[in-house]
Amino acid sequence: MPQSDSHAWVARRLRTIEQTKVELLQHVCNVYRSVQQANEREVTEALGGVVAAAYTLACEYGLDLSAVDRAARAALTCAAENGAVTEVEAVKRYLQAR
């Protein structure tokens, strides 16, 4: 691959990663906005967008998605230790069933 092609490829990859990071932040903003408006459908869509963007970003960084799942389960364990036991246990059961 000529050097100019490799530079163009790197620039495209960086642009894609930056775009995904912006999308992730937009989805997080949408979560807050839809919670404030008490719109369950929009909260669900926004949270789905957060999850999808997070997995997409992990792929773009070359991370193993199963490692991301393991990290999420570890984060849930920490959250349970901080008091959100009922909700965390429900999420852990869901993730283990997948």
Image (cartoon, rainbow, N blue to C red):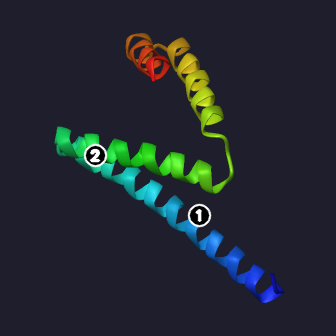
Give the residue pinned by disc 2.
Answer: 45
Q: In the image, 24: left or right of 69? A: left
- When asked about the image quadrant of residue 12, the answer is bottom right
Q: Which residue is disc 1 drawn over?
A: 17
Q: Position of residue 88 (x, y in %)?
A: 44, 17
Provide the secondary structure element on which disc 1 rests: helix
Residue drawn at (51%, 61%) of the image: 20
Query: How many numbered badges does the structure rendering display?
Result: 2
For the residues bearing labels 2 and 1, Cβ distance under 8 angstroms:
no
Q: Circle 2: is it few (<14), some (14-19), or many (20+) Cα within 10 Å?
A: some
Near mark 1 (Cα within 10 A), the count class, few <14, some 14-19 or many ≥20, is some
* Side (left or right) of 22 relative to 29: right
Quadrant where the image shows the N terminus? bottom right
Q: Amino acid at mark 1?
A: Ile
Above or below, 92 relative to 15: above
Locate the C terminus and report the quarter of the image it occupies: top left
Q: Is residue 49 above or below residue 38?
A: below
Circle 2: element type: helix
Q: Residue 84, image x and y in percent?
A: 43, 16
Image coords of residue 5 (percent x, y): 74, 84
The tag earlier along the polypeptide, 2 or 1, is: 1
**Above/below status of 75 relative to 30:** above
Identified at 47% across, 13% down, the residue is 83
Residue 65 screen position, x and y as percent: 60, 39
Amino acid at circle 2: Glu
Question: Looking at the image, which residue is at 46% across and 54% down?
Answer: 24
